[in-house]
Image: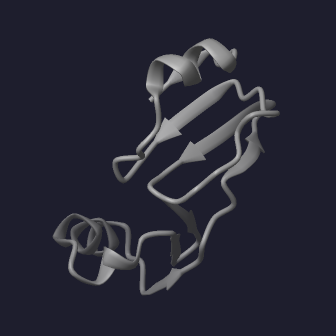
Amino acid sequence: MGYKHGRRLLINDTLYKTNSTIKDFCIGENIDNIAYVPFKKNFSFKNYDILIIDSTEVNYKNLHPDIVLLVNLPKINLERFIKKTNQKELL
C-alpha cells in the first residue's frame, strides 16, 4: 500500500526496491522520491474505519471497522473474526 503526495510516494512495504510494478508506476507518474513509512494498523478514510491485518500480531477484539484489509497472509481464524467484527467489506 502506498500514498502519492505530489512527486513523492510513501509506501509501507520494504520490498518496493525490488518490485517492478512500483518502479513502473513511479516512472509513469513522474515520482522522483519513494519513502518507506510504516502505516498504522487502523485508521479512518472518508468516514470509513479501516483495519489492516497482516502477519504481525494485532489486537482487533474491541475494534469495529467498516473495511478490513488482509495483507501478507495473516494467520487468523477467519470465520471467528467475521463473526466477532461487524465489517461491511473484507478485502
Q: Position of residue 16 (x, y in %)?
A: 33, 76
Residue drawn at point x = 62 percent, y = 28 percent: 67
Q: Quadrant of the C terminus?
A: top left
Image location (x, y in percent) of residue 10: 54, 73
Which residue is at a point 54% across and 46% down the rendered structure image?
A: 53
Q: Is residue 30 left or right of residue 44?
A: left
Q: Is residue 35 depicted above or below 26 in this figure?
A: below
Question: Which of the two residues, 45 or 43, is positioned nearer the viewer here?
Answer: 43
Q: Is residue 26 above or below residue 88?
A: below
Q: x, y percentage for residue 8? A: 53, 78
- Residue found farthest to the left: 20
Q: Position of residue 42 (x, y in %)?
A: 71, 48
Give me the residue at 31% from left, 76% from top: 15
> Residue 75 sits in which quadrant?
top left
Q: Nearer the viewer, residue 89 or 76?
A: 76
Horizontal side of 41 relative to 28 (left or right) equals right
Q: Is residue 44 above or below residue 85?
A: below
- Colouring mode (rainbow / by chain / secondary structure / one colour): one colour
User: Quarter-wise, where is residue 51 in the image?
Assistant: top right
The total number of labels drawn is: 0
